[in-house]
Image (tube, helix red, strand yellow):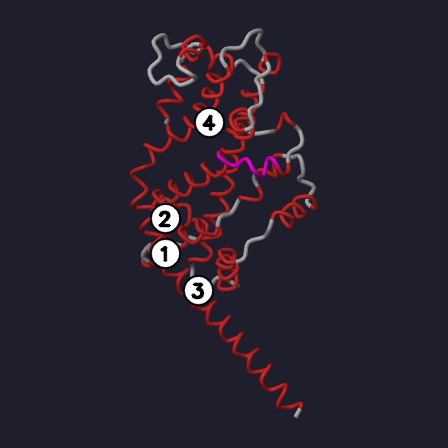
Amino acid sequence: MFLLCLGASLATKEELAANGGYVLFPSNPTFESYNVVLSGGVVTRAAVVSVVITLVGTALSLLCTVALAYGLSRPGTVAGKPLLMIVLGTFLFTPGIIPNYLVIQELGMIDTYGALIAPIMLNAFNIVVVRAFFQGIPDELHEAARLDGAGDLRILLRIVLPLSKAVIAVVGMFYAVQYWNNFFNAMLYINDGSKLPLQVVLRSYVLQGDTFNAKALGVATLPSSTSMSMAVLILAIIPIVAVYPFLQKYFVKGVLTGAIKAYELVRDSGRVVFGLVVAGCQALMVRSETRPAMAR
């Protein structure tokens, strides 16, 4: 499918018309569609928005995730267990669209770039994975650093983070893909067309069948609409495809090491929640049975 999209994006208008819009290996490849798409129009602006949102959002998400996970991984953290239960609770109870929208509206973030970052800044699964990875670091390293006079911040920066490059790289990849592919929040919170990310533009052209506008793209003439749609699609795929091979070696070490412990934590927490639900149901049943007896 990727090769088919790539071939269609490089094919000429005549070749696409002769083959019904599907070309796997174009006879005369041309980059005309890419030149038009990247000529400084709406697609270029949307691509810049997506790149900035992805870079800034990933940096903020990693900062908050590492800080929260490190605090939850250390024994004796103030309100550590209640905070951990709140994080785990988001696995079971997620807010709906309307509550999310009302919160963003009350914060004054409608039609701002912050609305594309704040709702997905933290991911409970990533926090649990990073926390479990931090807990796997030997306590002797923390104790030795404290004997040398290091505080928590210095231990995190000088010891924990250098040993956690694998999990941070993987979690950063997860966040980057999440920000790059996110289009639903933009449809909900963004009204200004100049602030829309690339995925919304791609959706309007490829799925909704909107026609390309030469004036909006900043050119005089347009190539085939099919070729341009495929060009936008390839541009939306290439960044993630290009980054993934460099981070692939970290996936096994980074994800599995923390995910196994994270699974055990979520499983045990699920059992606790299930036990509380069962106990509550039993209490309600006992109460409902005692009421008729008291009435007699």
Task: Report the predominant secondary structure element of the magenta stretch.
Answer: helix
Q: Quadrant of residue 25?
A: top left
What distance separates the C-alpha of mark 2 from that of mark 4?
Answer: 37 Å
Query: In the rendered structure, does residue 185 fall within the stretch colored magenta?
Result: yes
Position of the N terminus, as image quadrant, is top left
Mark 4 or mark 3, whichever is nearer to me: 4
In the image: residue 294, left or right of residue 242: right
Numbered badge on residue 269? 3
**Does label 4 or label 1 sit earlier along the sequence?**
1
**Does label 4 or label 3 sit earlier along the sequence?**
4
**Does label 3 or label 2 sit earlier along the sequence?**
2
From which residue to which does the magenta span run?
A: 181-187
The kind of residue on which mark 3 rests is Ser
Image coords of residue 17 (percent x, y)? 44, 12
Residue 293's place in the image compared with 285, above or below, is below
According to the picture, the residue beneath numbered tag 1 turns out to be 142
